[in-house]
Amino acid sequence: MGGMMAIPAGGDALTRAEAARSAMARLLAVAGHDLKQPLQVALMAIECAVSDGVAPRAAARLGQASDALVRLGRELDDLARTSQVGDAPPRLGPVPLGPLLAAVAAEWQPYAEAVGVRLRVRPSGGRAESEAAMLATILRNLVGNAVKYAGRGGRVVVGCRRRRGRIVIEIHDDGPGIAPERLAGIFEAFDRAGRRDGAGLGLGLHIVRQTAQALGHAVGVRSRCGRGSVFSVSVGRSTHEASGGTVLHG
């Protein structure tokens, strides 16, 4: 027929894939935003209950629940932010790693203590060339993942190495490790490394990869079954990097 052009099968598949990606991005954005409202209601209910007066033990448990809901709120913010990755390039600048790592660890410390995991951050005076909120999203997911996998009596250590003019942030855990056949797809959406314990949908590491790609940071993982895992983020060193701090060696 005159004036009409057939679209090759490959192009049609590409169009459908892009439409699906856009639809998923919109869904994640809506979910990340709309789910915040009931979350705020729950937090207010806990605050009112504590203010009305409860036994110390009950107050401590409500405090743990409140901390978990606050963390969930940040994760929903991460989800909404990730859905917008690609809309505009991030503005990079110097990000002090010491305070950022400490803040991320502080978010997970109550949960780590509740599940019997020792969480330790080694001090760093380094400054990364990054975007603070997006880098925090990456680290929050990696540290949380490590704490969940370490298990009771486990240990998680967060620190930095200097390597070839860059800074590599590493999150070590001594959990069960990841099977070699699982490593290739570990950063895919809904991949849970074979876990069947109901601990999340497997979006955390996908968020890590998408956010790191937007920032131009490399993420990686190495693991040995029965020996634990090491997740890493390689970031550029800021020209305004401060001196001092402790680095991992090896």
Image (spheres, grey):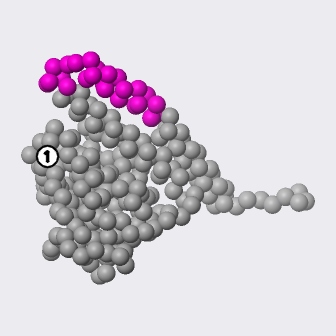
* Residue 78 rendering spot, x and y as whole percentages: 42, 48
Can you name the residue that lies furthest to the left here?
153
Residue 178 appears in the figure: no
Identity of the residue drawn at 49% across and 65% down: 91
The residue stretch that appears in magenta: 35-59
Give the answer, above or below, for where 54 lies relative to 186.
above
Q: Going by the image, does 10 lie left or right of 92?
A: right
Q: Going by the image, does 176 lie left or right of 168?
A: left
Q: Going by the image, does 13 lie left or right of 187?
A: right
Q: Going by the image, does 83 lie left or right of 43?
A: right
Can you name the residue that lies furthest to the bottom here?
164
In front: 98, or 26? 98
Quadrant for the N terminus, please.
bottom right
Q: Does the magenta portion include 64?
A: no
* Residue 106 rendering spot, x and y as whole percentages: 23, 49
Mark 1 residue crowding within 10 angstroms, few (<14) / some (14–19) / many (20+):
many
Identity of the residue drawn at 36% across and 26% down: 44
Which image quadrant for residue 101? Answer: bottom left
* Residue 33 rendering spot, x and y as whole percentages: 50, 39
Identity of the residue drawn at 60% across and 54% down: 18
Q: Which residue is mark 1?
A: 117
Query: Secondary structure under badge 1?
Result: loop
Give the answer, above or below, for where 226 lies relative to 75.
below
Residue type at mark 1 is Val
Main secondary structure along the magenta-highlighted residues? helix
